[in-house]
Amino acid sequence: MNGKTTGTSMRSDQIKKGPERAPARSMLRATGLGDREIQQPMIAVVNTWSDVTPCNIHLRELGEHLKAGIREAGGTPFEFGGIVVTDGISMGTEGMKCSLMSREVVADSVELATRGHSLDGVVVMVGCDKTIPAGAMALARLDIPGLVVYGGSIMPGSHKGIPITIQDVYQAVGAHAAGKIDEEELIEIEKNSLPGPGACGGQFTANTMALAMTTLGLSPMGLNDIPAVHPDKPDAVRAAGRRAVELVNEGVSARTMVTTASLRNAATVTTATAGSTNSVLHLLAIAREAGVEFDIDEFDAISRKTPIIGDLKPAGRYMAPDMFAAGGTPLVIDRLKKAGLITDTPTVTGRSLFEEAAEVNEKPGQDVIVDFDRPLAARGGFGILYGNLAPEGCVAKLAGHGEFSFTGTARVFECEEDAFDAVQHRRIVAGDVIVIRNEGPAGGPGMREMLAVTAALAGQGLDDKVALMTDGRFSGASYGFVVGHVAPEAARGGPIGLLREGDNVTIDVDRRVLETDADLEARRADYVPRKPAYTSGALAKYAYTVSSASEGAVTAFPDLNPGQD
């Protein structure tokens, strides 16, 4: 749908101009609007506020600053509530099946709120990690003026004088199971890891995608870097509200920013900072919504030529507030620009990416973002592998270990819970390749993250001694020799469903291979995929409509669109 405003014509004219729209105007007047507010550009504010998670709990207050900015610029804001499913709470439970699906629900909600009321622009306020790509997907789908506002990172907690995050709590669970810490220390870590509002503090999925939003040009430079509780956050959010109205008046829609070039830039900053592998799913989904050519192999090509320069958790030392203090996104962009690894692209500010990054203010002596002459790793954090276990591809997370190949013995589990139980009861040993299947987009359904398992392995000191492969995915806080997004998934007849306990499995990043020497085809005739876990409700609908992880795990109806994938 065309969202451009030309002259005095606005999309919202459909609900507010002419004698026949008197009933609609009457409804608007009942909310307290007068003639001036009705005549102004109408801006949807889709706020994913919730008090179930620190990631989003402060968005209600920030939303007031955003709406104030919209009013200051001569716009009329309409706030809508959006949902959030927080991984930190649902991790390792049935609830985690709802997490990735919530991305689609939020994107659909933004579309319905905006399209259903013929509004002129939209701002999506986001926190926990699936809400961020959801906002970008909706903007790309609608192609109207708008932007994404990230609530910001949480500040670090502390244990024994050492900064900690939610990652440390998960690892403490594994350490407790291994007898390395007692229950009292576990509880102390639990109580002190998260000091207040904001999304998880490492370069996990939320902060990875917040960085990607800025690089895509959908968030104003610097806004997403500001931590949730920083005194500068309200004014920055208010300025974003003003800019949303200007975008409507200028007729600048979202697809101006979302291009193959900007998606490559976003993938580059993600891999250069050793960010979350979930960014692969999310950037593919955004590309699809925008109708832009961009496939999974882009991530491997970019990763091979892009060293890691961000010393950030989960594999590094620092957190998002440290990166903000060091110089933030402008510093990362400036480094990559000088290395010739990214190109200049438009942004919602009206200035180009390079123009915005030119104002970088690097903190003297900082070592959060290093120079390219002394990178933390020679290649970026992703590898895209194929082979007889992943004909459609899979994603290897390379940050956190220095190895690029692993051969071991398959330990096969039909779900995450069974694998976690095996780890907790010390049934996993060095040389094992943990295989967790039936956790894909359709099979889970919902493609759960395996953080409980990977963190428990790390807590037991096994993270660099075993490998893990799954048709599910990983938290941004996961590290170790892990391979996810294996496609096709087991539920869709993928070869991962044919593996058996004791099979030999090889992971080779340099050769881009995930393979076994077992005769898989000989087993196919006897293979029976598991029955769907849900036969009604939202999860059943999602399982029926979701695409392969190699295509971004988006919901689609290809039969209704002949000639389209």
Image: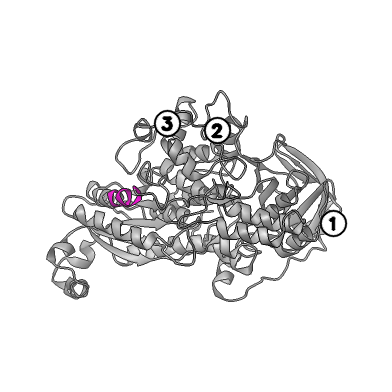
Helix, strand or loop status at disc 1? loop
Residue picked out by circle 2: 309
Residue 262 can be seen, yes or no: no
* Magenta segment, prevailing SS (helix, strand or loop): helix
**Which amino acid lies under the numbered mark 2 shown in the image of this protein?**
Ile
Residue picked out by circle 1: 501
Q: Earlier in the sequence, mark 3 or mark 1?
A: 3
For residue 535, side relative to residue 74 (left or right): right
Residue 105 can be seen, yes or no: yes
Residue at figure coordinates x 61%, y 39% from the top left: 381
Q: Which span is picked out in magenta?
A: 232-239
Using a 10 Å C-alpha cutoff, classify the residue at mark 3 as few (fewer than 14 neighbours), some (14 to 19) or many (20 or more). Answer: some
Residue at figure coordinates x 61%, y 62% from the top left: 91
Residue 352 occupies which quadrant of the picture?
top left
Residue picked out by circle 3: 362
Residue at figure coordinates x 54%, y 38% from the top left: 273
Tell me, yes or no, whether the highlighted magenta stretch contains residue 235: yes
